[in-house]
Image (spheres, grey):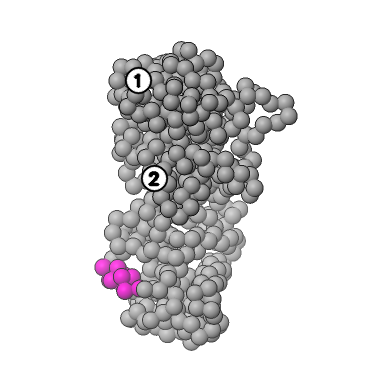
Amino acid sequence: MRGVWTTDRVRAAEQRAFTRVPESRLMRAAAFAVAGEVAALLAERTGGVAGRRVALLVGAGNNGGDALWAGAFLRRRGVAVTAVLLAPERAHAEGLAALRRAGGRVGTELVEADVVVDGIVGLSARGPLRPDAAALVERVSAPIVAVDLPSGADPDTGAIEGPAVHAEVTVTFGGRKPVHVVGPGAIASGWVRVVDIGLGAELGEPDAVLLDRAEVARAWPVPGPTDDKYSQGVTGVAAGSATYPGAAVLASGAAVLATSGLVRYAGTAAEVVRTRWPESVATGSVTDAGRVQSWVVGPGLGTGKAGRGVVAEVLGAGVPVCVDADAITLLAADPALWDARDPDTPVVLTPHDREFARIAGEVGSDRIGATRQAARTLGAVVLLKGNSTVVAAPDGRVLVNQARSAWPATAGSGDVLSGLIGALLASGMDPWLAAGCAAHVHELAAEIAADGAPAPASHIVDAIPAAIRSVRAS
């Protein structure tokens, strides 16, 4: 798993590293990495490095120092470098001297450039770009390489509340920060390259993690020689209604295709589910469904008295439950429903922002913090949907699944995700990991289904086997 650390943790690690290695040496190592990324982008976009033009947007402090040192390294490769100082009196003295010795220019106006380096603000900054910096960035037409983070994005939440840099590439040091993985800042960061400058031993356990595809592949259940449909997990699906039968079909289909176990559907859409998924065992009610190892409840269920009774029955069944959509709304409206749950029974809640607000309060700008707090308060795994999906466990563990596209943002897509989670819960997987793995495969299935054009949720279901094959081939 790749780690994510808050800025406080990173700064503390830097201070510990400075006791072993001079700060100036670490700065030069960081700047050398930035220069290398700029050179790679120049070669990719223009076919060469020597003779190309780079502009540095330089703020005060160490972030500007990184940019200036990067400019000095680029000069040694024959690049024409001009630094625009936003705070000349507070520019990093050693970095500025190095740039001038290497033959770099210092100006006050943005010059035409093939690549621009964003060294305006660092991890200590908060809030949008100031007017002078915003005006400068507004005039940039070349691709931008950001030093540590795109200036104007909050480093610990990824929030952008005004003018900000939108980078092609961000070069960060030691490890990813929240800005690189959640909120608008994750998009503004572009492609993120993490450079080890010697902080690894000082960082400690991460505040959040990103699942690698290989880790999803190792965790995903596949049948062994002694398995049968029961040993691989039986998933119960309590979803759909006369108004929304499609939700039942989508959630059941996702569970059918996720593993090689058995799916039992219980609800008013039994005939529709049976027709579309003859592999499933479809009955009219939860009480008639038979034994299961997990339940999915909520998609298209309705929020009336009948839906409330289904949620109470499922929560009291003593098996892990994935709670989505209408079931979340019912729990928010009637917290007494939680009393039906055995406190030791794992629950995974999968709200989008509006559902989250109903059950745990407004998300706000700190998506990781809000999801972690909700998981602790509710005693459940919480999966907060979004372009970057955040999954938090009651014990404080957090993982983030970054989407490479917005293709999953379509009606019924959440029903598919719930079915995937339910199947993984039935297999016995840790609920936190199950939610993360399901989010990863769900996003990949949406990408495969879309193939460059919008695709409905039913196509996402059909693409699940291809997504699992892709993951396992990694």
Q: Residue 133 magenta-drawn?
A: yes
Give the residue number, with chain letter if any, for mark 2.
Answer: 409
For the residues labelled 1 and 2, say whether their Cβ atoms are less than 8 Å apart: no
Q: Could you tell me which residue is drawn at 61 percent across and 30 percent down?
A: 260
Identify the amino acid type marked 1.
Answer: Gly
Camera-nearest residue between 179 and 121: 179
| Magenta region, residue range | 131-140
Magenta stretch: helix, strand or loop mostly: helix
The answer to whether residue 199 is visible is yes
Q: Is residue 206 visible?
A: no
Residue 220 among magenta residues: no
Secondary element at tag 2: loop
Q: Residues within 10 Å of mark 2 (few under 14, many from 20)?
A: some
* Residue at the extreme top: 287
Most extreme residue toward the left is: 131
The answer to whether 412 is drawn above or below residue 230 in the figure is below
Residue 47 or residue 162, whichever sits in front: 47
**Residue 392 position within the rendered picture, expressed as x and y whole percent measured from the top left:** 46, 37
- Kind of residue sitting beneath label 2: Ala
The residue lying at 49 percent from left, 38 percent from top is 461
Image height check: is 280 above or below 350?
above
Seen as rendered, the residue at the extreme front is 275
Counting from the top left corner in percent of width and height, residue 129 is at 31, 64
Mark 1 sits on what residue? 307
Q: CA distance from mark 1 to mark 2?
A: 26 Å
Task: Label 1, secondary structure: give it.
Answer: helix
